[in-house]
């Protein structure tokens, strides 16, 4: 195969990313895993005889939940009795039965509180002959703020802002969310009991842990109040969180507030959960597309986490190794990874973890001929911006220099957005109808001369 131009490689990187996203589109995932067969509703191989079900209630929350609900409505048609879901603003679909609450994300708002209350009131109507179908996707935690007794929405908003800015992982963030909530950490299952409960999930977390996805409202919680206090200590947040939050968590750790329901609790005896889409599935689809475009693909991992800049440096080093030695795969090569990194924000700029990842590679790939780096969120949005991510190549540094831009200056201010915008290297935000964390694509072409 003749070496491709940088322009063609950039187009290829976008195609490879889009193939991964399309493979985990929410409605398609529901239709692949759910079916109605001779009066039985199946999720994969788990079936419920609907002749024994009086009411079917559909609830849930997340960025992709409206599209999941549309597919469930198509499958179950008029069998659905009622439904309530919570989605981010602008993520509605054309639903006939299920009511859509729109609410704030990533910072929760009062609409989310009202929506969570509405869901709880609905599932409380369910009894033993009923079925509750809970549709869960990424973003579900922020969209369902239902403060525990003694806490306010303002307390939760301030806590989430602080956790997001300190670089805490989604696992740490959701551990605190579960212990500050009357909805998360298995509590929705408590409210649904004794009805049958089927949770259908699109995973946006490392390892696809059901109790982490949207803070696990319908599954047993394995974390504790004591874990929350350790997280606060680890990130040095003791003087940055509201006193009411600290008092609540301290009281819980002392046994003065009931823990979240754990494995073995009766509320989970009639509950099942099913993950129908994940980052790994997206990566495998990207791998297939890369092969079709003539690249030798290598998957690093779907579970990469850690500081964004450090992970970016590791990816750039792999690209250099491919050029120098042909390992771990020979060029033309496509390196694919997934997961979700974290940014410790110290500057005043604008961006997201994917934009920052690409910016952190710009100087390194300038010394590696014929290399393209793309990183974007599968949910079509990266941070509080109108971009899904960014793309850069071997010539990005020299193009930026013509505009008087130094990538290190922008990186130190966490301002990747304004670095890439004048270069036209932002990937525009889009409605992807899914959310399975991030995809990172690195393409490398063969070069005739070895690198210095």
Image: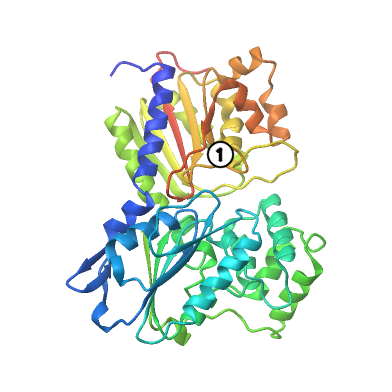
Residue at left offset 29%, top offset 60%: 74
Is residue 296 or residue 174 the one in the foreground?
174
Count of labels shown? 1
Is residue 61 or residue 185 the one in the foreground?
61
Q: Is residue 383 above or below residue 448?
A: below
Q: Secondary structure at mark 1?
A: helix
Residue at left offset 44%, top offset 35%: 441
Residue at left offset 60%, top offset 27%: 420
Q: Quadrant of the N terminus?
A: top left
Q: Is residue 286 above or below residue 68?
A: above
Left or right: residue 257 versus residue 102 is: right
Q: Is residue 47 above or below residue 193?
A: above
Query: In x, y percent, where is residue 4?
Result: 36, 18
Q: Label 1: few (<14), some or many (≥20) within 10 Å? A: many
Q: Which residue is mark 1?
A: 354
Left or right: residue 117 versus residue 198 is: right
Q: Determine the residue located farthest toward the left in the rendered image.
A: 38
Query: In x, y percent, where is residue 194?
Result: 42, 86
Residue at left offset 35%, top offset 17%: 3
Q: Is residue 40 visible?
A: yes
Query: In x, y percent, where is residue 37?
Result: 19, 69
Please say which color scheme the image uses: rainbow
Is residue 296 or residue 271 the one in the foreground?
271
Q: Is residue 221 visible?
A: no
Left or right: residue 317 versus residue 231 is: left
Query: In x, y percent, where is residue 342?
Result: 61, 48
Q: Is residue 52 above or below residue 70?
A: below
- Asked where in the image residue 44 lies, by quadrant, the reply is bottom left
Left or right: residue 289 versus residue 385 is: left
């Amino acid at each position: 195969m003749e070496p491709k131009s940088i322009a063609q490689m950039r187009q290829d990187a976008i195609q490879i990313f889009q193939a991964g996203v399309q493979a985990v589109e929410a409605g398609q995932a529901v239709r692949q895993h759910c079916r109605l067969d001779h009066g039985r509703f199946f999720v994969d191989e788990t079936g419920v005889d609907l002749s024994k079900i009086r009411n079917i209630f559909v609830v849930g929350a997340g960025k992709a939940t409206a599209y999941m609900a549309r597919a469930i409505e198509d499958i179950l048609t008029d069998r659905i009795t009622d439904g309530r879901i919570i989605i981010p603003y602008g993520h509605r679909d054309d639903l006939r039965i299920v009511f859509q609450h729109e609410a704030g994300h990533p910072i929760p708002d009062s609409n989310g509180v009202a929506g969570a209350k509405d869901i709880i009131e609905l599932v409380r109507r369910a009894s033993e002959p009923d079925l509750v179908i809970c549709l869960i996707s990424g973003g579900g935690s922020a969209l369902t703020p239902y403060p525990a007794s003694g806490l306010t929405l303002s307390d939760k908003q301030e806590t989430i802002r602080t956790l997001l800015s300190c670089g805490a992982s989604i696992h740490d963030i959701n551990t605190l969310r579960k212990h500050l909530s009357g909805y998360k950490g298995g509590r929705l299952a408590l409210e649904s009991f004794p009805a049958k409960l089927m949770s259908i999930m699109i995973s946006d977390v490392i390892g696809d842990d059901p109790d982490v996805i949207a803070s696990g409202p319908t599954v047993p919680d394995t974390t504790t109040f004591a874990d929350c206090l350790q997280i606060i200590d680890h990130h040095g947040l003791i003087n940055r969180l509201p006193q009411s939050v600290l008092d609540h968590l301290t009281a819980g750790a002392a046994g003065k507030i009931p823990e979240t329901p754990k494995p073995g609790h009766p509320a989970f005896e009639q509950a099942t959960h099913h993950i129908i889409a994940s980052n790994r599935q997206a990566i495998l689809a990207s791998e297939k597309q890369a092969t079709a475009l003539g690249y030798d693909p290598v998957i690093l991992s779907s579970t990469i986490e850690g500081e964004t800049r450090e992970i970016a440096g590791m990816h750039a080093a792999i690209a250099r190794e491919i050029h120098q030695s042909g390992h771990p795969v020979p060029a033309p090569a496509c390196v694919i990874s997934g997961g979700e990194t974290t940014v410790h924000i110290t500057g005043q700029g604008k961006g997201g973890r994917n934009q920052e990842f690409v910016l952190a590679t710009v100087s390194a790939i300038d010394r590696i001929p014929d290399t393209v780096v793309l990183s974007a969120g599968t949910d079509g949005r990266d941070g509080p911006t109108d971009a899904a991510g960014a793309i850069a190549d071997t010539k990005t540094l020299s193009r930026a220099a013509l505009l008087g831009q130094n990538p290190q200056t922008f990186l130190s201010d966490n301002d990747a957005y304004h670095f890439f915008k004048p270069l036209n290297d932002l990937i525009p935000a889009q409605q992807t109808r899914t959310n399975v964390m991030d995809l990172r694509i690195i393409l490398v072409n063969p070069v005739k001369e070895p690198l210095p």
